[in-house]
Image: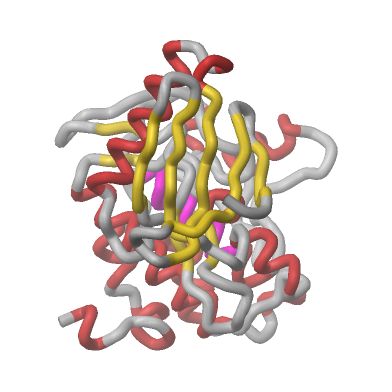
């Protein structure tokens, strides 16, 4: 084990070298004695999710070692940090084509999760890791701590997530399902294109909630001047406040904007 690259509630994350796999990995070291049974159950649920979520753009679980006191979870090492840090390094300005490619890959992976009955419920830049810091870097979805398994046609009404990225139906405590993740993709799309969130307030949480529930998508900012009309239409379709009017994950993957900039013909095939 080498340098500490992160600290969490129950332990640290270090860079490590896996001798058998002959590769550098990220090692999450969890102090089991500092955790409640509910916390430990949550960690084991996340591990179970990572075991079955083998999509290319989900953080890869590589190994697990456990003893009486500690749990060591080894995943692929993403040297680019999280998406927020990646954007911050670029002053929150990336080319539209890069934004489209990232959203296409994010949607592709979310589609994979939904097919397994997994709703993430906290899609945001801090929970998306980047493979490296280059302009060619790709993403990995991570942090499944509040994800949920749903049966077909099953819904939930738990108010969970991160303000600014939570769908209107979640904020209101209404029944919701996979479309809540679609809203999260929409907010991230808006952020990648403009450098700021569509519904935000630096001082009042209640203002963020009010804007999310009642205000129209703000397209008046100068940032939209050089963004394509197809991108704008995509954002309109995905950030529908009524979940029944929101486009589906399948419609996202076949959207004209993503087909123009991001869709790989071999992948579509």
**Which quarter of the figure has residue 117?**
top left
Colouring convention used in this rendered image of the protein:
secondary structure
Task: Find residue 157 and report its horizontal and vertical position in percent.
Answer: 39, 23
User: Could you tell whether 67 is left or right of 94 in the image?
Assistant: left
Say if 164 sits above or below 269 in the image. Answer: above
Residue 196's quadrant in the figure? bottom right
Residue 204 position by quadrant:
top right
Q: Is 181 in the magenta?
A: yes
Residue beneath the point at 35% across and 62% down: 21
Q: Is 115 placed above or below 144 here?
A: below
Number of numbered discs on residues? 0
The magenta span reads 179-190
Q: Is residue 15 in view?
A: yes
Foreground pick, 155 / 15: 15
Residue 67 location (% of width, % of height): 41, 26
The residue at 58%/16% (across/down) is 34
| The C terminus, quarter of image | bottom left
- Which of 144/177 is in front? 144
Q: Given the current orientation, which residue lies at the most extreme right position?
A: 203
Magenta-colored segment: predominant secondary structure:
helix
- In the image, residue 95 sits, relative to residue 161, either above or below, namely below
Residue at (33, 82) in percent of width and height: 263
> In the image shown, does 244 or 52 lie closer to the viewer?
52
Q: Is residue 127 magenta?
A: no
Q: Nearer the viewer, residue 149 or 129?
A: 129
Q: Is residue 37 left or right of residue 232?
A: left
Residue 233, position as x, y percentages in the image: 47, 72
């Amino acid at each position: 084990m080498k340098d500490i690259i992160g600290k969490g509630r129950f332990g640290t994350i270090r860079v490590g070298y896996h001798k058998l796999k002959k590769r550098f990995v990220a090692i999450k070291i969890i102090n089991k004695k500092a955790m409640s049974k509910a916390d430990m159950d949550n960690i084991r649920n996340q591990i179970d999710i990572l075991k079955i979520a083998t999509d290319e753009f989900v953080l890869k679980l590589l190994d697990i070692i456990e003893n009486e006191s500690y749990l060591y979870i080894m995943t692929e090492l993403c040297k680019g940090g999280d998406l927020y840090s990646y954007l911050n390094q670029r002053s929150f300005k990336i080319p539209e084509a890069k934004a489209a490619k990232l959203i296409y890959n994010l949607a592709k992976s979310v589609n994979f999760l939904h097919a397994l009955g997994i709703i993430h419920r906290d899609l945001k830049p801090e929970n998306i890791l980047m493979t490296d810091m280059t302009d060619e870097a790709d993403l990995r979805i991570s942090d499944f701590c509040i994800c949920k398994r749903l049966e077909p046609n099953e819904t939930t009404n738990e108010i969970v997530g991160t303000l600014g990225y939570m769908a209107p139906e979640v904020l209101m405590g209404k029944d919701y399902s996979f479309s809540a993740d679609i809203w999260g993709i929409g907010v991230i799309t808006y952020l990648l294109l403009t450098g700021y969130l569509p519904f935000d307030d630096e001082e009042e949480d209640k203002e963020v909630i009010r804007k999310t529930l009642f205000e129209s998508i703000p397209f008046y900012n100068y940032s939209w001047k050089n963004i394509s009309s197809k991108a704008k239409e995509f954002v309109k379709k995905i950030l529908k406040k009524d979940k029944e009017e929101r486009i589906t994950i399948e419609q996202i993957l076949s959207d004209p904007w993503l087909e123009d900039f991001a869709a790989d013909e071999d992948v579509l095939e």
